[in-house]
Image (spheres, coloured by chain):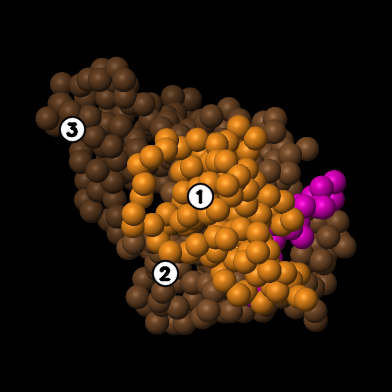
Amino acid sequence: MSSPLSSPDLSRLVDDGYTVSITGGHVCIADVPYVTNECVVAYGVLVSPLSLAGDITTRPSDHVVTFAGAAPCDRRGQPLAAIINGSARQVLGDGLVVDHTFSSKPTDGSGYANYYDKMTAYINILLSEAQAVDPNVIATPFKPRLDRPDDSVFCYTDTASSRAKISAITDKLRVGPVGVIGLGGSSGYILDLVAKTPASEIRLFDGDKFIQHNAFRAPGAATIAELGACPYKVDYFATKYSAIHRHILPHASFIDAHNVEELRHLSFAFVSMDDGEAKGIVLDTLRDLGIPFIDVGMGLYEIDGALAGIVRVTTSTPQRRDHVSKRIARSNLDDDLYSTNIQTADLNALSAVLAVIKWKKLLGFYNDLDREHHCSYEIDGNTILNDDLD
Amino acid sequence: VGHGGLVRHLFSVKAEIRLEQENTLTTASEPTRAESNERTNIIVNGRPMHVDGDEITYEQLVELVYPGLPADPNRVITITYRGGPRENPQGTLSPGYHLKLKGGMKFNVVATVKS
């Protein structure tokens, strides 16, 4: 996959922080400051058609650009007659509508060598007048932008890490495929967090459909149309989160003895399953394959009209697995007699947050002094208990 | 005798735990380390209960919350506690282990299996 934005002149505009996009064969730069006839700063969009060869820019075919916005003026509110060549609304297609045409030839008369020179020449004319009105005005706001193709798992650049200057620490999360096994309430929130990490792939395993009650224990907000389509959970979540992470792979089946092989290449697995017997097969397989995992589960009960209980997060690594059998059930209680199916979105989210924090600790993203492998949150005491410390 | 039978045996012979909800709290003693012959007031899953003696086992706590649960070696009930005596002030209780009791000690006993 290629994009005109990989052209050197356009990528330089991007790198400088201009708000660059490609629309219908045009390069558009938004957030361009200019002065209106009322001597206030406004922002418009500068548009130029692109000349491309194999999706790479060539020398601009002319020196003219168009502009969406009011008539730009100088610092005293007088129209910039030196560059305004015409003012008439033009529909360029693909949703592009412009109001003015600018014409300003380079002083040497040879035309612009590239789109960087062409666009910045006009921007600087408008910007200098705007900065005379307000010295704090900039034309390079560094807004979120499309990533260049194929160099990231993300659909757009992770500016959260670069902005916080933790990109080197975030690099520790550049791990191989991460499995999310069982897509109950907790796993939705696990995906919500893992999708924002640079893990190479996120593989979702669940054979259930996403139905109405699931929407009340899932991150974000499902539309009624999405519910009406009765998608598999894995497809619903893969579609939602493909808006940010490009490699989310849905597997619309439960893991059982027939397809455990699908777990083989995972770097890590988050396990969140109601069925204890099926979970036992998964945990044995992960152990045999040497794959570290975190299992989350909760148990809630009602007491005098209020809910309480425990949220549990249990970690198993190739170096530490001996505690698993006494911490994680692999049989099913008779729900009618002994158990409830009470779960709530906030406790699902809490278990997911605790699990993802622990995963990041295992990868060295967070410091981990106590190195617990079992964590229990008591709701009625707001207490976190750590067990199975290294 | 199966696991469940053993639990019930221990439960009935050794601990003499009464399940009735406490409606007649005595005001005699501050929460302190329990004595072996005294009745101890504890809170299990938010509900006040009386326990005879100064110790309680994992299995007895499971029986309090899930009476008559059939034996199953693959089952795990998560038990947490806090407000205990200095020997075991706070933590997680595993199968086969027991705790020293203290008045007012709080327990959560629940299968943590929902996802």
Res A36 label: 3
As shown in the figure, which amino acid type bears the numbered disc 1? Arg
Query: Is the Cβ of the residue at disc 3 closer than 8 Å to that at disc 2?
Result: no
Q: Colour of chain A?
A: brown
Q: Residue at 60%, 44% (x, y): give it.
A: B36
With A236 as the anchor, is A68 left or right in this view? left
State the SS at label 2: helix
Q: Residue at 28%, 37% (x, y): give it.
A: A43
Q: Is residue A183 above or below residue A126?
A: below
As shown in the figure, which amino acid type bears the numbered disc 3? Thr
As shown in the figure, which amino acid type bears the numbered disc 2? Ala
Res A215 label: 2
Q: Do callouts 2 and 1 point to residues on the same chain?
A: no
Q: Do callouts 3 and 2 point to residues on the same chain?
A: yes
State the SS at label 1: strand
Quadrant showing the C terminus of chain B:
bottom right
Q: Which residues are magenta?
A: A311-332
Who comes first in sequence, dot 3 or dot 2? 3
The chain that hosts pointer 2 is A
Quadrant showing the N terminus of chain B:
bottom right
Q: Residue at 68%, 43% (x, y): give it.
A: A387
Evaluate whether residue A126 shows in this view.
yes
Rendered location of residue A77, percent (x, y)? 15, 26
State the SS at label 3: loop
Q: Is residue A339 above or below residue A344?
A: below
With A132 as the anchor, is A16 left or right in this view? right
Q: Is residue A315 magenta?
A: yes
With A23 as the anchor, is B10 left or right in this view? right
